[in-house]
Image (spheres, rainbow, N blue to C red):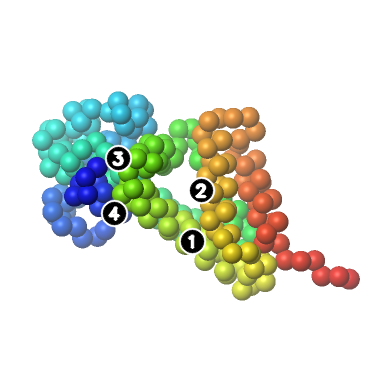
Amino acid sequence: MPANDPAARVTAPARRRRGPASTEDGRRSRDRVLDAALGLIIEVGIDRVRLAEIARRAGMSTGQVMYYFTSKEHILLETLAWQEHQDSLRRAAAMARVTGAWRQLERFVELYLPGAHPDPSWILWLEAWARAPHNSQVSRFLEALLNPWADDLAALVARGVAEGAFAPPAAGFTRRFIALLDGLALQRLQQMRDTSRKHLTGLALHAARIELAPPAHPE
């Protein structure tokens, strides 16, 4: 995408937006497009999605869809940001219901890994990741979307260390652990053997204990 392509500048939904989606009606129309696009991307992938079909499902004309978005790639990235925004709200609510550092880490892993097949968020991530190697702007955009996950994990670990539940990990733990979760997620998405979310969560926690379990005190 060229540097001035809106898809390169898309950010997670905000309460106030400028441009076509700056009004309440505009936001509702835009969300209808994103909801329609999400369903179609899950079904057939972004490359086989037709703008006319997105418009039909959204109850709009193709021209109306293009009023809010400049291309299918723009729609893909906006849909991912929109879905991540919804997921972040659900993650905050779910984490607030859990106490104890290890239980919170377990819940974080469960929320990160793909759920039922197909998992909407992960399908969007895979579609977007396929474009990142060829576009540094998309790569930076995806990194920004992943940062809230990394920030939440870093904060969780810091609280666990302060409470004495975790030992201070070596530098780079957050990046290593996120990379581990990504690898486990890809195994689950490929529906490989022994890739239930419960089993993969156990593998992730085993790796975490190697770095985070406090040393045993001698008797």
Q: Earlier in the sequence, mark 2 or mark 3?
A: 3
Q: Earlier in the sequence, mark 1 or mark 3?
A: 3
Label 2 amino acid? Tyr
Label 3 amino acid? Leu
Packing grade of label 1 (10 A; few <14, some 14-19, many >=20) is some
> Looking at the image, is mark 2 or mark 3 nearer the viewer?
3
Q: From the image, tell me which residue sits under label 1.
A: 152
Label 1 amino acid? Asp
Q: From the image, tell me which residue sits under label 2.
A: 112
Q: From the image, tell me which residue sits under label 4.
A: 11
Q: Earlier in the sequence, mark 1 or mark 4?
A: 4
In the image shown, does 184 or 133 lie closer to the viewer? 133
Distance between mark 3 and mark 4 Cα atoms: 12 Å
Asked which secondary structure carries label 4, the reply is loop
Badge number at residue 76: 3
Residue 22 percent location from the top left of the image: 15, 55
Distance between mark 2 and mark 1 Cα atoms: 11 Å
Distance between mark 2 and mark 3 Cα atoms: 20 Å
Place residue 39 in its image quadrant: top left
Residue 122 percent location from the top left of the image: 44, 40
